[in-house]
Amino acid sequence: MDCPLLVWMLSINREVSTDEYKECYELIKTCVPHFKIKAEPTSGESFRQIVSQMMPLLMMRHRRVPRSKWKDNATPLGKHWIEQDPEGMHPDRWLRSMIGYSLAYESSLVGMAMVQGRQREVVNIGIGIKQLAVEPRDVTVKAYAESLAHKLTPLELSFVSPDLADDVILRRLCILLALKQAYIKAIGQPIGFDWSRLEFNIPEESALGDGAPLQGWEFRLFKAVLGVVRRGVLIEENYQCVSAFFRGTKESKFVWHDNQKDLESWVQFINIDQMIKVIPKLTA
């Protein structure tokens, strides 16, 4: 299934003002009527949700498609896709112009994975983001891993054994959790889904769901490193990111992107200043 896949990652790399929050909130109220959220200008969680809903608007603006010429649809499982106005398009081209997308966010990073093709194909897209940091901030890596053990299988727990170095445990844990999040989003499962029903065998690059092989999936794995200003201090944040897309191939495929050059053709990084700057154009 040859559907081109793109990912946009937005860095909330500084504090935002109340006025900026309100500007983003009003945009969503006007242009994304299906998304309901209460205004909470002091809530970082609220702002991340709002910015994630702005990503499809920015993507369609980038494609020079006016807001009045497309609509946002969703399947019964909540999988979103964008349908463009068919006017002036050949019917076959219009059928292949649907854009499926998936949104995710964590801490200072908001991501959107998108793919274009037929509607039944493009909805099978998901994105996962996991920051390489413990939560709460004062716990040890081993205690953090233990708190998330219920999301892992016995095999996966062996990959994050307490006798390993902290950085190895954290990196492997975040890879596993980002993979699971991306796949769960791709299949449209609810928040309460039991993550231990999925098993990712990283050394063998294979995956199981309820004990059966997951076939036909493409998992792309990459890292994001952000410079973020918090209370006037520049800090570095690291994230593990994964896109999951069903391509219908015989086997599932894991693609590891370890350098910036690999990413340039399909991942675009932007920051909150760039997003806020174009808000007036997103309603057009």
Image: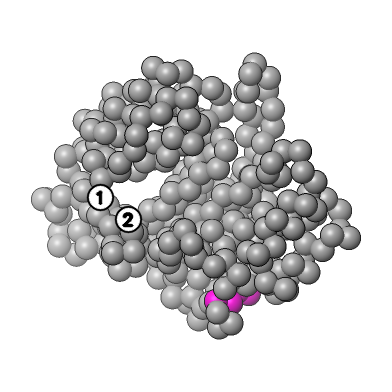
Query: Residue 95 in the image: x percent, y percent?
Result: 22, 63
Q: What stretch is highlighted in magenta?
A: 205-209
Compared to residue 283, the image places residue 129 above or below, namely below
Number of numbered discs on residues: 2
Q: Position of residue 153 (x, y in %)?
A: 67, 71
Q: Is the magenta stretch mostly helix, strand or loop?
A: strand
- x and y percentages locating residue 229 in the rendered image: 62, 23
Q: Does the magenta stretch include residue 208?
A: yes
Image side of residue 83 versus residue 39, left or right: left
**Could you give the CA–CA distance between mark 1 and mark 2, rounded to whole angstroms?**
7 Å
The answer to which of 6 and 130 lies nearer the viewer is 130
Of mark 1 and mark 2, the one earlier in the sequence is 1
The residue sitting at 50% across, 81% down in the picture is 250
Residue 211: x, y in percent? Answer: 58, 82
Q: Which amino acid does label 2 sit on?
A: His
Residue holding disc 1: 72
Q: In this view, does 51 lie to the left or right of 282?
A: right
Question: Which residue bears the numbered disc 2?
Answer: 80
